[in-house]
Amino acid sequence: MSYRRDNRPSRSSLLDGFDSLEEGGLRASSSYSRDINEHDNDKAIETLHDKVSFLKRLTGDIHEEVESHNQLLDRVGNKMDASRGMMMGTMDRFKKVFEKKSARKTCSYDPRIFYAWVRTCAKSS
């Protein structure tokens, strides 16, 4: 038994030294992993920054495209309004012309009918 008791203090002293080495090793390992984590975080931040910058440029380009399309649509709308006005004027003029021509045709048919009636009456007598 005394042998075991004598071994215990020596074992604990050996393990105490190992624990201190292990703690130092853990400290070195944790500071190393902390550096790696910071490096990974920096890379992730740079990647996010690049993506955000890309999205910002993309949204700016989309905004410019939308503005140019809105201007184009406004111009097309204005031209359509002008065309509609011209078409309405043209339609009004056509209506007037057709009304006058139909009135002229009616007047021109009356003398022809009268002339035909006169000829028919003359032949029969």
Image (tube, rainbow, N blue to C red):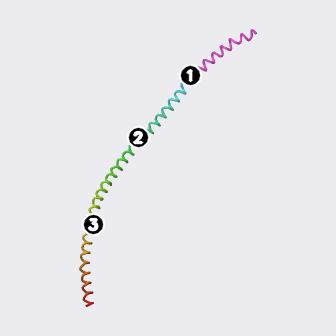
State the image coordinates of residue 62 (x, y, percent, origin top left).
39, 45
Q: Residue at x 68, y 12 (%)?
A: 10
**Label ID, residue 70:** none
Q: Which residues are magenta?
A: 1-26
| Marks 1/3: CA–CA distance | 99 Å
**Label ID, residue 27:** 1
Q: Secondary structure at mark 2?
A: helix
| Marks 1/2: CA–CA distance | 42 Å
Residue to which mark 3 is pinned: 95
Q: Residue at x 30, y 59 (%)?
A: 84
Q: Secondary structure at mark 3?
A: helix
Kind of residue at disc 1: Arg
User: In the image, 13: left or right of 71?
Assistant: right
Residue to which mark 2 is pinned: 56
State the image coordinates of residue 122 (x, y, percent, origin top left).
24, 89
Q: Are marks 2 and 3 in contact (CB under 8 Å)?
A: no
State the image coordinates of residue 81 (x, y, percent, origin top left).
30, 56
User: In the image, 63: left or right of 103?
Assistant: right
* Label 2 neighbour load within 10 Å: few <14, some 14-19, many 20+: few
Kind of residue at disc 3: Lys
Residue 2 on the magenta span = yes
State the image coordinates of residue 119 (x, y, percent, origin top left).
25, 87
| Quadrant assignment, res 11 | top right
* Label 1 neighbour load within 10 Å: few <14, some 14-19, many 20+: few
* Label 3 neighbour load within 10 Å: few <14, some 14-19, many 20+: few
